[in-house]
Image (tube, helix red, strand yellow):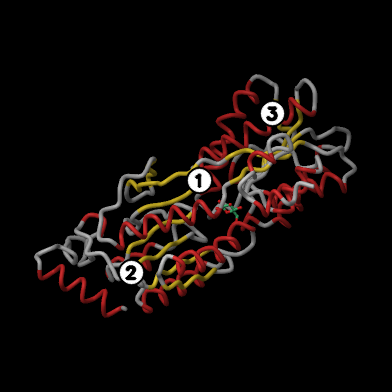
Amino acid sequence: MKLKKIAAVFAAAALGLSVLAGCGDGGRTADPSETANPGFAADSLIGVSLPWLGTQNWKEAMDMFGSELEGAGYQAMVQSADNKVPQQQQQIEAMIDAGVSVLVVAPVDGSQLGSVLEKAKDAGIWVIGYDRLIENTKAVDAVVQFGSIKTGEVQGQSLLDGLAARKGDGPYNIELFGGGPADPNAPNFFTGAMSVLQPKIDDGTLVIVSGEVDFNVVATPDWSNQKAQVRMDSLLAAHYADKTIDGVLSPNDGIARAILTACEDAGQPVPVVDGLDAENESVISVWQGIQWSTVYKPTDKLVAETIRLINILQKGQALPAGNETAENGSKTVQVFALEPVAVTKDNAKEVFANDPERLALLV
Ligand code: BGC
């Protein structure tokens, strides 16, 4: 298969197409997205590099990429990197050596894959960012994700709606949490949420009792639920001995559950907490009236969108423009963004109508 690909590259070169053109930047191969696309064999090997399996969405992606890529006629090499940058770099190197035609990459750290992905480009491999942006390199052709700013806006709005629904009139005492700072989604989720919350902080409806509002202070290293719980324990001990906490902004479901556990341990009434991923445990919690909401970003849709792009590339066609763009520090990246949806007990049956696994949890 590697041979087939090499043959295709030579065939294209013989036709005068500039597959290997562009030595202007130190002999590096031109970005294939800016050159003719010779396509690749319909049974090519596709590499998928995931950051870790610590949240349900990545486990789903691991399974679905394996089965859906094979279902589409490709061979699949799907790996996850245990949240370790060097491990992800090595896995991607091995995928390049194995002769993949496309690399689908969700980076552990958005800005640490430049050199290995530039190597992939030199080998004529397409690079698609999956769920997370790939930063500070030209070696990315497109990103598929649920709009990350939009996701944060949905989270912030859901927190406000939950406070109004459950906690009467304000002002409300709240705290803020962000995701793992190495993940480019995390600051974007936070920016999106703060665009909704800041006006309510400014007008006094929301009171951040700890005063901790800076992303770098509220971020949760490695998206670790345990680290989030430790921070929530200390916030409660330091600031809420004589106060009730009404709500907490949470970047995902695992962190939401950690926050809820800390509040329960501190003897607080259940605060309004949003989430992300519609993880089974949180869907159950929402249905039982504990976690206020989650945000649904169905993995099957994101995997299907990725495979749609792979099929376009396989046929030798040019990628269309995305419906959004993102500046990654080196180039403007085309983003194929899907819509995230807030889920509360009220709309859960409707939102999960076509997701039998989650629907079955609503009993
Ligand atoms: C994903 C979330 C996930 C988080 C931690 C983010 O990049 O968008 O779905 O919860 O990583 O794994």
Q: Amino acid at mark 3?
A: Asp
The three-letter code of the residue at mark 1 reads Phe
Tell me the element at label 1.
Answer: strand
Residue at label 1? 146
- Give the side of residue 268 with respect to residue 41, left or right: right
Q: Residues within 10 Å of mark 1 (few under 14, many from 20)?
A: many
| Contact flag, marks 3 and 1 (Cβ < 8 Å) | no
Q: Is 201 placed above or below 126 here?
A: above
Nearest-to-viewer mark from 1 and 2: 2
Q: Is residue 53 visible?
A: yes
Badge 3 density bin: few <14, some 14–19, many ≥20, Cα 10 Å:
some
Q: Which mark is residue 42?
A: 2
Q: Are marks 1 and 2 in contact (CB under 8 Å)?
A: no
Looking at the picture, tell me which residue is in the foreground, 362 or 134: 362
- Ligand 1 near label 1 (Cβ, under 8 Å)? yes
Q: Is residue 20 above or below residue 322?
A: below
Residue 199 percent location from the top left of the image: 60, 23
- Seen at 23% across and 66% down, the residue is 28
| Residue occupying image coordinates x 68% and y 36% | 347
Q: Where does label 3 land, which residue?
A: 161
Where is residue 49? Give x, y as percent.
Answer: 48, 66
Q: Residue at x 88, y 33 (%)?
A: 242
Q: Label 3's element?
A: helix
The answer to which of 330 and 296 lies nearer the viewer is: 296
What is the distance, in whole Å, between disc 3 and disc 1 at their CAs? 21 Å
- The numbered dot on residue 119 is none
Q: Secondary structure at mark 2?
A: loop
Q: Categorize mark 2 by other alpha carbons within 10 Å: few (<14), some (14-19), many (20+).
A: some
Measured in 3D between alpha carbons, the distance from the residue under mark 2 to the one under mark 3, in whole angstroms, is: 48 Å
